[in-house]
Structures are given as C-alpha cells and as structure tokens.
Image (spheres, rainbow, N blue to C red):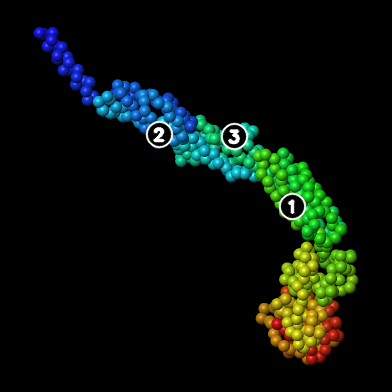
Amino acid sequence: MRHGLLSTVAFLILVPAASGATPVVTIQVSPAAGPAPLTVSFVAAGDASAYHWDFGDGGSAEGATVHHTYAAGRWTATVTARSSTGETATQTTIVTAYGLTLAVPNPARYGRRAVFQGALIPAEGNVAVTLNGPRGKLATGRTRADGAYSIVARVRQPGAYVATSVRGSSTPLVVRVAPKLVTKLVGSGIRRSAYFLAARLTPAGAGGLAVTITQGTRTLLDRTFGNHVRVKLDTRELTSFEVRIAAVPRPGYVGVSRILHANVVLPRLTLGSRGSEVARLGSRLRRLRYAVPTEPSFDGRMLDAVYAFQKVNRLPRTGVVDDRFWRALDNPRLARPRFARPASHLEVNKGLQVLYVVRGSRVALVVPISTAGVPGTYTPVGRFAVYRKVVGFDPSPLGTLYDPLYFTGGYAIHGNPSVPPYPASHGCVRVPMWMAPYLFRTVAFGETVYVY
C-alpha cells in the first residue's frame, strides 16, 4: 500500500511541470556583423517544439537552424519558440551588415578633379575610407556622423573604382573618361600666310581623331588620324572653313568634339600701315562713297575714313581695321540719306557723327564729323541753308574756323585739326582739315543743310 501511494504522489507532481510551462530559448548567431551582403546562420536552442524566425527585413523562416542573407543595415532578428501545448517565448538579436556606396559624375573628365561620394550603411562617423582606382590607391577620406563621405581625386584612367574601409568595400564602379581634346588654329589667318589646324587628344591611348574640313558646301578633307594632327589650310583666297574634330574613342573612353571656324582675312591695319592691302582698303571704301585718300598709306586721312565706316556700321570706333571690320566691309550697311529733296543737300547725322553729301538724292560722300560735346553747348537741329562762306581761316569767339560754311547764326561746317570719333565741339560741325576745301568748293550758297 505504501509503495502505491508514493507512485501516485510522484505522478501528481510531474504532470503540472509538463503542462503550461513557458519554453526556454536561446539564440546563437554567426556572424553577428560583417560586410553586406551578409549571410548569417541562426541556431535556436531550448525545449520548444517549434521555432519561427522574423529576420527584421521582411524575411522569415521556420526551424531551429536557419540561414538568411542581409542587405546593408542594422537589423533585429526575432525568434518565437512555441511549446507543444502552445505557450510561446521570444528572443531577439542584432545583426549588422555594413554597406559602402560609391558614386561619381560619369563620364569623368581626364585629368580634372572629380568628387567621389558615398555613405557607410549603417551610419558611423570617423571611419577611414580609401578610394582605389585601376592603378591602385588614389586618395582617402573619413565618414561624417551621418556616414557620408566625399573624396576628391584626379581621374586619369577608365575602369573600376572601389571604396574600401574596415567595415567593407563598395561595389566596383566602372568609370568612363572623357579625354582632353585641345584644338587651335595656328597663324593669323591673313591671306597668303601660313595657317594650320592643330589638334591633340590626351591621353595618347584614348583614341584617334576624325577631321572634316568644309568650305561652303564642299568637303575638302574627311579623314581619321592618330591622337594628334596638323593640317595646313589654303590661304590663297579670302574664304571661311568649318573644321570639325571628333575623338574616335577606344573602350573606356567617350567621344568629345569641337567645331572651329577658320577665316582667311586681310591683315590687321592700323595707323602707319602701308602697302597693297591699304590700297585695297581705300579702294573698297571709295566704292562705298567714303572720303578716302588715294595714297597706299594708312595716314590720318585713312583713319578718318575708317572712323566714318565704323560709325555707319555700328562698330566700335577703334580706328583699327581688324577681322570684324573686314567682315563688315564684306557685307556693309549702306549710307542712305534721310531726305530725298532737294536732290542736292547736306545731312548732319549727329547720332552717327557723320556728314552725308547728297547728290541726286543719293549719298555721294561720307565724311566723319564731331558735333557739340562740350558741357553746356549744343548743335542746333532742323533744316537750314548755307548763308555765308569764308575762304581760309575765319576767327570766331570760340576759335578759328577753316573754310567755314555757316548754316545758322554762328554755327558752321568747318575744318578743324581735331575731329575725334565722338562729339567734342562747342556746337559747330567739325570736319577734317583735308576735307574742308573740297566741301567749300562743291557746296553752293543756299544749299540745304539738315541737322538731326
């Protein structure tokens, strides 16, 4: 009887222990941290009959031993242990998968500073980051508190660039390179002078150069060269060339191109220049009705004509015959009178600072002038007539006038040694001394003078 009683008591004690007890569970993680993508092994130990895993990134699994691969980030994994009678218990663990990003403007320009940027995930500050290129280490930097970093380095080679740190490395970033294309026109472009196109692609291994030269609708050259080229341009005639230079890139490099316009022009002429080109300039200005001397020298008289042309054509009043002057001379603004009647008259254009001698209702001569520019003075505007002419020098309260043609009161068109390309007189209309006798001879008493 005693033995049977003890057995019954033992049974009563064990039954509560096996029913309704919370399961015991522990977690082993390997590894708990490392570079992403990080594959982690999870092992749950305890007395549960089932285990459910929530990996914290949206993934889940069942079983005591499971594996999961994490992207960059800090994750909380949770295991739920369930007993055979339905009771549950949970445990959590932290897994850190480190990621390092890398970006740069792509393509990068050869030899220029490029800013490589990225971030350490999850964020940690003061972590050293090394940038490595196709030929090894380029530069270093450190992460900020938010994990971001930037490294400045010169890009000289296409290929894979990688950022590395103690936490891991970035995915290789394939960077293409835009080579450096240097183009120039060697020479002045003056007719019958040496004139060359020169181009070079750097680095030498970046590829070749395709060169196309056209003259209007004609293609003069269409050819591919090595990484540098020098081509002579024909300067026997005044013309314009369009030059297209394009890189033919090798793998890893991208194409770059340039367009140049090469003009074969007449020379730059200034006060004191002499020769056939000065004579040619004078001839062309005379055809446009400008007052020009016949001698092939760029003297003060030619300077007056150049100023007059620049005024009418709205060019800077430099007194220099440059490329812009020659281009304007090829397609000039024609001097036109404002008034058609009477058929013969004079027009003083104060806006342009020129005098038009009108004959047959057309401009027969263009003369540079200088009207009122002294403070407190003015040149009267309106329709007038020449009422008095004085040969030679005529003293006046404001100075001596040379061959004056008085058109109202004391105002006259007269010669003066100083006729700058801007208003500077006391009110009269100054003309160059060498033109005053011609005007005196050809302008009659009573001839109409318009001033506007």
Single out the mark in the foreground, 1 or 3.
1
Single out the mark in the foreground, 1 or 2.
2
Q: Which residue is mark 2?
A: 59
At mark 2, the secondary structure is: loop
Mark on residue 132? Answer: 3
Q: Which residue is mark 1?
A: 244
Dividing the picture into quadrants, the one containing residue 115 is: top right
Residue 367: percent from the left, percent from the top? 79, 77
Q: Are discs 3 and 2 less than 8 Å apart at CB?
A: no
Within 10 angstroms of label 1, few (less than 14), some, or many (20 or more) residues? Answer: some
Q: Nearer the viewer, residue 13 or 287?
A: 13
For residue 245, above or below residue 216: above
**At label 2, which amino acid type do we have?**
Gly
Dividing the picture into quadrants, the one containing residue 111 is: top right
In the image, what residue occupies the spot 75% across and 47% down?
Answer: 210
- In terms of sequence position, does the residue under pointer 1 or pointer 2 come before the other? 2
**At label 1, which amino acid type do we have?**
Arg
Q: Nearer the viewer, residue 65 or 152?
A: 65
Mark on residue 64? Answer: none
**At label 3, which amino acid type do we have?**
Asn
Residue 227: percent from the left, percent from the top? 75, 43
In the image, what residue occupies the spot 78% across and 59% down?
Answer: 216
Left or right of 398: which side holds 178? left
Q: Are discs 1 and 2 less than 8 Å apart at CB?
A: no
Residue 8: percent from the left, percent from the top? 14, 14
In the image, what residue occupies the spot 11% across and 8% down?
Answer: 2
Q: CA distance from mark 1 to mark 3?
A: 37 Å
- In terms of sequence position, does the residue under pointer 1 or pointer 3 come before the other? 3
For residue 151, above or below residue 348: above
